[in-house]
Structure formats: C-alpha cells, structure tokens
Image (cartoon, rainbow, N blue to C red):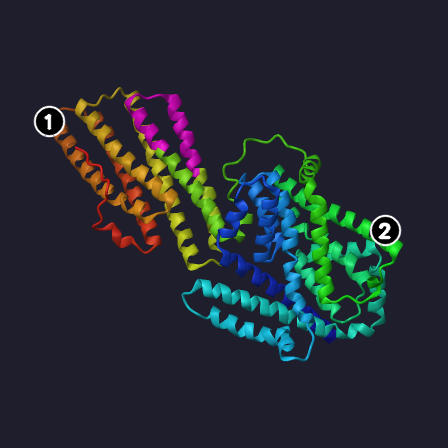
Amino acid sequence: MDFFSFLTLAGGIALFLFGMNYMGDSLKKLSGSSLEAILQKLTSNRFKGFFLGLFVTAVIQSSSAVMVMLVGFVNSGIMKLAQTTSILMGANIGTTMTAWLLSTSGISGESFLFRLMKPTSFTPVLAVVGILLTMIPKSEKKNDVGSILLGFAILMFGMETMSGATSGLRDNDSFMKILVMFSNPVMGILIGTIFTSIIQSSSASVGILQALSLTGSIPMSTALPIILGMNIGAAVPPVLSALSGNTNAKRVAASCVSIKIIGVAVVAVVFYIIHGIMNFSFMNSNSSVFTIALVHTVFNILSTIILMPFCRGIEKLSELLIKEKHTEEENIFASLDDRFLAFPQFALEKSRELIGQMAGLSKQTFNGAICISYGFDETVAEKIKKQEKLVDKYEDKLTAYLVKLASLKNTVRESNEVATLIHVIGDIERISDYAYSIVKTARDISVNGIKFSKVAEYEIDILSKAIDDMLTQAVKAIQTMETDQAAEIVPLKREADRMIAETRARHIVRFRNGECSADAGFVFLDLLTAMGHISSHCSNIAVYLLQKDGEATRLHGKKANKLRTYP
C-alpha cells in the first residue's frame, strides 16, 4: 500500500463518516419532534422501552444520539433513570441496522438482479434522485428525503473507495502480522474500543471494518474481538455528554458503560471457553461484510437477552458507581439542555414550555403589584421583586438558548418560530418590569400617605381587571401557540386603550376641579402609564404570534368571541 493508496483510503473514510453524519442528521430532521416525543413517554414497562429504543435507533441510525438524548432527558428531569435502561438495550440492537445496509456491498453475482442490488449500481441513482430533491425549492420534507438519499450515497461511495484503497493489503506481510496480533481477544477488544472511542460511532467503526473485510484478508478470529470492543467504545459519547450533567445524567452514562462492558465480558468469556473446548472452525475463515453484520447483531441480541432481567440491578450498580450529591433544588432551567439542540423541534418545545412559565410568572407579578397598591406590605413587595428578578433570569437563559438554536441549520418554520419566541420573551420581561414599577408607585403611596378618591379606586380596579384579562389571554396564547388565542388579545387591547384614555380624561377633570391632590394625581397617572405599557406589550406578543404563521392581517377587523366589556 503506497502513499497515494493511503490518501485514497483517508478520503474514503472522510466521505464515509461525512455521509453517515449527513444521513443521520437528515433522518433526525425529517422525523421532527415525533421520535423525541416517543422517547420522552414515561413508562415503567421495560419491554415497551426496549422496543422504543430499538425503533428510534433504527430510524435515526445512531445509538449514540439516542443515548445522548436520554442523558439530556434525565438531566432535565423529563425522565427517570429507571426508564432508560431498557431503552439503552433496545438502542444497542437498533444500531445494527446500519451494518446490514452496508452489507449490500458484499452482494456478488452476474445476473441483472444481483448487479442491480450492488451499491455501485444503485448508489449513483440514489445520488441523482437525492440531489434533485434537495434542489426543489420550498419543500422542506422533500429536501430532507433528498439529503437522506444523498448521505447514504456518499457513505456507500466512501465505503467503495475504502475497499478499493485497501485491496492491496491482502498480500501485505506487515498488515497480516498486525491482524495476527489483534486475533488475541484482549488486544482485539482494546483496539476496537479505542478506535470507536475516537470516531464516536459504533456504526461507523463497524462499517470501516466491513470495508476492510472486502480485502478478504481479515479472519473471524480478528474481526470478532474487534467488534466486541467497538460496542464498548460506543459508550463514549454519552459519557462525554454526561460530564456536565447532574447526578442522574451521570448515572445514565454509567448504565451505558455497564451494559456494554458486562455484555462484552459475559459473551466473550463464555464464547472463548466454548471455543477452547470445541475449536470452532469458522474462526479461521475470512470475515465478510455479511458475517460482520451478523456477529454485530447476534452479540447485541445475546447481550440484551442476558441483561434484560437485571435492569434494576444495572440501575443499582450505576447508583453505587455515582454517589448522590447533596445539591440545591433542581434547576428550573435544566430542560434548556444543549444536547437537545440536535433535535430542533424538541428544543423548541422545551423552550415554549419555559416561556409559558415565564409568562405566568409575569402575570403573577402584575396581580401581586395591583394587590399591594391597595395596602402596601414590604414583605409582599420583596416577594414580587424576587419574582421580577426570576423573570429576568428566564429572559437571559431562554434568549441565550434560542440564539444557540438559531445558529444551527434549521428549517424555515423553525427559524421563524425561534425569532418569534425571542421577541415574545422580551415583551414578557418588560411586562414584569412595568408590574414592578407599580410596586414602586405603591410604596410611594404608602410612604407619602396618599389617598385616592372612591371613584379613582374604582377606576383602577376596573382597569386592572381588563389588563389581567389581557395577560390571561396572552399566557394562553403563548402556552398553546394558537393564532386564535393570540387574535383575541387585539380587541382586548382596543378596549383597554379606550378605558385608559377615558380614565385619564376624567382624572384631569377631577384634578382641575380640585377633587384630588397633586401628589395623588401624579401617582395615579403613573399607574395608568404602567398599565398602558403592559397592555401594549400584550398586543406585541399577539402580533409576533400571528406573524409567525403569516396571519398578522387578522389583527385588524377581528372581534373576539368572548370580549369582556367594562364600564
């Protein structure tokens, strides 16, 4: 194997890895949030969890992605540790599907059907169809399907390139000596673990081994322990992902490692003991793409059968390995996990949930501020201040997370929703700011002994109820993301504007007639101004939500079905 063959091999590996990642990303994008939602379903049924893991991994072609997702779910409190063990086992079997897809490169025969099934025949067709679909404008689903086909064509082309570059290794003495060294089970498992740890994908490492097997010079005695080691190396991505997680996230990673190591240890020990007694003849035969796929699948099935009854034992083992740390109460922002950024729809869903909480908290801040304006209480005022500070934290955390999400390659719809949510977050935060300004006004009223007339108190009470109705509708619109809910804010805004204008006019008349003091007049106008700003920010939220789906025109002329009228 000369220098130029080595360059060809490196290029083939690069194409293979790129194609696998590209295909996997496209599969995840096409699936939207459905697969993540399936994984998120809480279930204590280990068999249901097993089939969920198998199905999802077979679809997105990446057990590492599923494992990292589970780490994120547990880290954010969405799932419990006990719900992940069987899913991890299912993922181990689901990931073997990739090896079977790659095994088509080993099909041989001269008939038309056999030649058509070979990658060299159908890969160019997939590439042409894929590139045509990706060029179709304004059709995101077809673009994703095209990307999947194109990614598969690239990885198959990379595999053919690798096998071509390594074809001369059959007669290479140095290469054969290395293979003999790796036929030692311990060395083979070690090299398989290290290699997969580096590229962080068991599917990719098995695929590369399949490409090398096309040289016809890799015996099963070498391939088998390497495959076992590759299964251990697949646990590296979730371990790296869990390093920044909480205790339970680390326990999920520990479960991944435990399942892999125990499975390999049990299967390897039993197999090599029986092999020592019976001396299996197939161990001296050369491996092929089919036998590698078969060994990969059989090992994971056997490992799952052996370990499935001990799910609870594996959980206890992970708890022993990772001790509980006495930390503060679980962070409410834990669901803003960077692991979920690989699944934009799911990340958006988690963001929407927190934005809904944020909106509800702003509404509480307003209600508390109105209550305190009738009778000031410093303890309540401090509580409202803490709520307002928490809303600020919501804004900082959510905005930073959505900016990260916006920097990724998203669909047009996802990009529009991210932009909308960032605007909505800003308006929610401003609502809490103006609510706290009412608290400051209430403090001035208490300190200066200011008294409102009965009429003024009645007007503030009616107006605050109107603003509260707007906030209630805005919170519903944010939580449901439904345009009908958002559209109903607009007539409420018009009603609030009318009430504020009329209240301001009546107040000026009272002030001119000497019915209220200058101090009372100023703080009364401050209250009206704060509520007017809150009303405007509610309207802004409606505009953004309607514009997200191109329905901003509904802002004009639409009347709410349940419009509340005020005197």
Most foreground residue, 48 or 434:
48
Residue 199, position in %: x, y?
Answer: 67, 58
Q: Residue 243's image quarter?
A: top right
- Image quadrant for the N terminus? bottom right
Assign a secondary structure to mark 2.
helix
Q: Residue at x 45, y 38 (%)?
A: 393
Magenta segment, principal secondary structure? helix
Q: Is residue 342 left or right of residue 202?
A: left
Most foreground residue, 232 or 323:
232
Residue ranking furthest to the right: 277
Q: Amino acid at mark 2?
A: Ile
Residue 53 is one of the magenta-drawn residues: no
Most foreground residue, 28 or 363:
28
Residue 201, position in %: x, y?
Answer: 66, 57
Q: Is residue 225 left or right of residue 90?
A: right
- The disc placed on residue 273 is 2
Figure check: 531 above or below 400: above
Residue 521, position in %: x, y?
Answer: 20, 28
Residue 374 is one of the magenta-drawn residues: yes
Q: Residue 457's image quarter?
A: top left
Residue 490, position in %: x, y?
Answer: 25, 45
**Residue stretch rendered in magenta on the structure:** 364-392
- Image quadrant for the C terminus? top left
- The disc placed on residue 513 is 1
